[in-house]
Image (tube, rainbow, N blue to C red):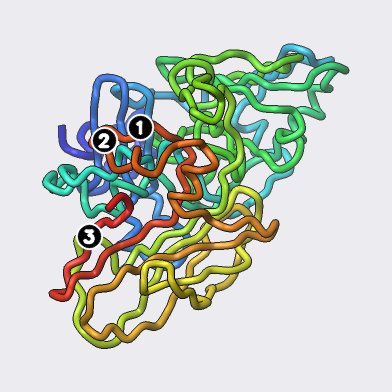
Amino acid sequence: MAAGAGLVARGKPASAQGLQQHVHNEPPRRGARYSLDHLTHYTPLQDYSGIITPAPVHFVQQHSSEFPQLDADEHRLTIHGMVDRPLSFSMADLKQLPSVSRVHFVECHANSSPASHNPQSSQNPNLGLPVQYIHGMASCSEWSGVPLSVLLNEAGVQKGGTWLVSEGGDQGKFSHTLPMGKALDDCFVAYGQNGEPLRVEQGYPIRLLVPGWEGPFNVKYLKHIKVVDQPYNTWNESMNHSVSRNDLGGKARWYHFEWAPKSLITRPSAGMEMRKGYVQITGLAWSGAGRISKVEVSTDGGKNWKDAKIQGPVHTKAHTRFTYDWAWDGQEAIIQSRCTDETGDVQPTVAELGKHWNIPIEDWTKPERPRAIHFNAIQPWKVARDGTITDAMFI
């Protein structure tokens, strides 16, 4: 199945487009995987500038084999459970309430996972370059919508209501829990992306936006929010996304929240070629804890680090663009970046991350690597003398 297949063409009248009029169909894209229970589109991080991901190439992780067809005129968001006033909001209701527009990244919990560093994937032309299929389940947009605190205040949260269960209107009713403290802090129900209505693949007509936390919290096609007094064991939290960990004695952690600081060089990167002389290294850095305060670049495999230039504006819990001017002498090199966020947390090496998770460094080099999520280790790219570049994460 070709990427973009089944989406309606731009320019057709609304009557012809029907319920999918906001798909804004684009030419088939590279960087996609399809299966019976997943539709995945990887963002081509290597191909755009700045920090805003163009909406047509924002990553997609759909837990079904098709996108739901929802009518915005009929769609409603219900807030119920431990509230004084159960409420049902239409799209018109939501757009009459106070709104915000903020720039935030969204990242799948499995982005950059050890298993994605698979040399065989580079043989599949549909997946794009390694930086795309390894790290491309992360994107950054300007989202617009209603603060969740406004909706919860309207409903009146009862004493003891400490968690939310969010449910989508898709075929599988994707569900996820959310602590009340985070919900009242900076979460919102988004109906716009980069100045236009949400696209179908991004949750049209509304989705939850949980800044800085892993992707599954950002429930698409949002239909129900239930206020409860404890976290629920939804499928993705307790089964599908649980990973046994050595540091927990082989037990699985069920709940994962904030993304730690992370950065990577997007150009030049694996699959590209360099010429001797001036090279502008560029990439992205982000953290679920807040703003990026510092980015450093090494061209000798981490022996020495120099400050990169950070391009403003620097938003909280958003991608931050950095650049570094380098004169390549034609010798073999390892280029990599690391970032520090405003809390002082520094992006780790794979060895440091393995030590924290009690995973021996030699395990990372085995053909079947340990399963891991929230993988934010420094990404090294190896530059050969002939200018070719390869992934050097596990060499």
Q: Secondary structure at mark 1?
A: helix
Q: Secondary structure at mark 3?
A: strand
Q: Quadrant of the N terminus?
A: top left
Decide which of 379, 53 is in the foreground and name it.
Answer: 379
Labels 1 and 2: the sequence-earlier one: 2
Relative to 230, is 344 above or below?
Answer: below
What kind of residue is marked 3? Thr
359 with respect to 103 (left or right): left
Q: Nearer the viewer, mark 3 or mark 2?
A: 3
Distance in Å between CA atoms under marks 1 and 3: 40 Å
Q: Are marks 3 and 2 in contact (CB under 8 Å)?
A: no
Q: Residue at x 84, y 16 (%)?
A: 160
Distance in Å between CA atoms under marks 1 and 2: 8 Å
Number of marks present in the image shown: 3
Q: In the rendered image, which quarter is residue 36 located in?
A: top left
Residue picked out by circle 2: 7
Q: Secondary structure at mark 2?
A: loop
Q: Are marks 1 and 3 in contact (CB under 8 Å)?
A: no
320 with respect to 266 (left or right): right
Q: Nearer the viewer, mark 1 or mark 2?
A: 2
Residue 39 visible: yes
Say the numbered circle drawn on residue 20.
1
Q: Residues within 10 Å of mark 2 (few under 14, many from 20)?
A: many
186 with respect to 8 (left or right): right
Q: Nearer the viewer, mark 1 or mark 3?
A: 3
Q: Position of residue 232 (x, y in %)?
A: 63, 14
Q: Residues within 10 Å of mark 1 (few under 14, many from 20)?
A: many
Distance in Å between CA atoms under marks 3 and 2: 35 Å
